[in-house]
Amino acid sequence: MNYLADRVSWINESQTIAMAKAGRELKAKGFDVINLSFGEPDFDTPIHIQNAAKQAIDDGYFFYTPVAGYPELREAVVNKLKRDNDLDYSMNQVVVSTGAKHSIMNVIMAIINPGDEVIIPTPYWVSYSEMVKLVEGIPTFVEAGVESDFKITANQLEAAITPKTKAFLFSSPCNPTGSVYSKEELAALKEVFVKHPEIIIISDEIYEYINFIGKHESIAQFEDLQDRLVLVNGVSKGFSMTGWRIGYIAAPLEIAQACEKLQGQFTSGACSISQRAALAALISPLTATYEMRDAFLKRRDLVLALLAEIPGLHCNVPDGAFYVFPDISAFLGKRHANGIIETSNDLCLYILNTSYVSIVPGEAFGAPNCVRISYAANDELLREAIKRIGDALSKLD
């Protein structure tokens, strides 16, 4: 007898988690596995944020929190958006959740009905499509390849819009590609949205501070879109606070109130200690954040240089986040001792099982000819990992 609800079969397991799990299993058997599959900074949370959490414990922050977050944290989000992005929001438009993933799911549940279409540029973060499917929405993909720096054009966006289109969901800087939309590119997309006032834009900006080309440009800056734009952010990436699980939205009041209502029946308010730590992150100088960003930039350049020495890999130059997303088409169809490389998943499993390096197949992100390699690791590990990958690829014929 099948006791499970149908929705369980509608979605796929996260391949980023699956590859990390496979790597851990090999490591538990004694193999020297290098994990470049997780989207997680390898730095410790900055000490002033740690101290704020300790102080919160000393100060007795032990009890349930307001569903939308502590007022002082929501106010800090408002001030951050004004300080860093020149955006004007009220505290009532901010909802704090248990991570940016939770924030996005809240929004999708609040706005998508069965049969509604959500346009998602490809490559996309692995959970976007599955979230849409969970609420019986229809993900509609717009493909962008390495030749266009994995960014879609206004013409592509226009062509994807149908009478059923309800939302547009994207990230910049992007996971998995590291691509960053310029102000001019966002302005071109904005002109399309102006012609379609029924479409809600969800802008995932969790990698805002890991930006190698200067000022972060948010699509929220365009006043034409203010009444239907949801900005998603959090502290996981820019402050190395992945385990603290704090994300937030800034949204039109109606959507913010809907998300608060839904969250009140699912998780209620986020962790009290984590919220106090997030408050310290948002109100303090960004010195530690920029030091991490600069370290990621050096690692990016190192990894790109090492990958350039491997024949057959084709990379763009990512302008943000901490991933490279090489095209591996040249290796599809090649053979190894135990079979043929037919997909990027085959290639990742081959590399994991022969060279003990865990990376993520592009199928997870809607780009089956690519793989994602995280460079959230120290230089020594990155050099060794890329060497192993190169050795494994050289043995294919």
Image (cartoon, helix red, strand yellow):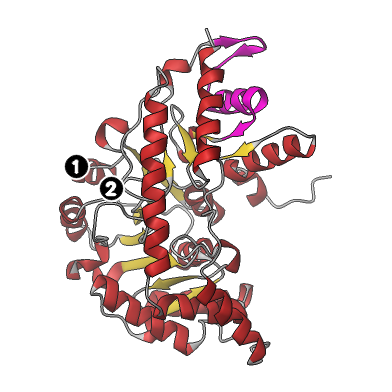
Distance from Cα at disc 2 to Cα at disc 1: 10 Å
Quarter of the image where the N terminus is located = top right
Q: Residue at coordinates 23% horizontally, 63% vertically from top-left?
A: 197
Residue denoted by label 1: 155
Q: Is residue 368 visible?
A: yes
Identify the image quadrant of residue 225: bottom left
Is 350 one of the magenta-colored residues?
A: yes
- Rendered position, 299 above or below 70: above
Residue type, label 1: Asn
Which residue is rendered at x = 57% and y = 75% of the image? 50
Query: Please, what secondary structure does the residue beneath circle 1 have?
Result: helix
- In magenta, the rendered stretch is 335-358
Q: Using the image, tell me which numbered label, if any, was put on residue 161.
A: 2
Q: Vertical placement of 228 versus 68: above or below? A: above
Which residue is at a point 39% across and 42% down the rendered structure image? 300
Relative vertical location of residue 133 with respect to residue 266 in this rendering, above or below: above
Position of 318 with respect to 133 (left or right) is left
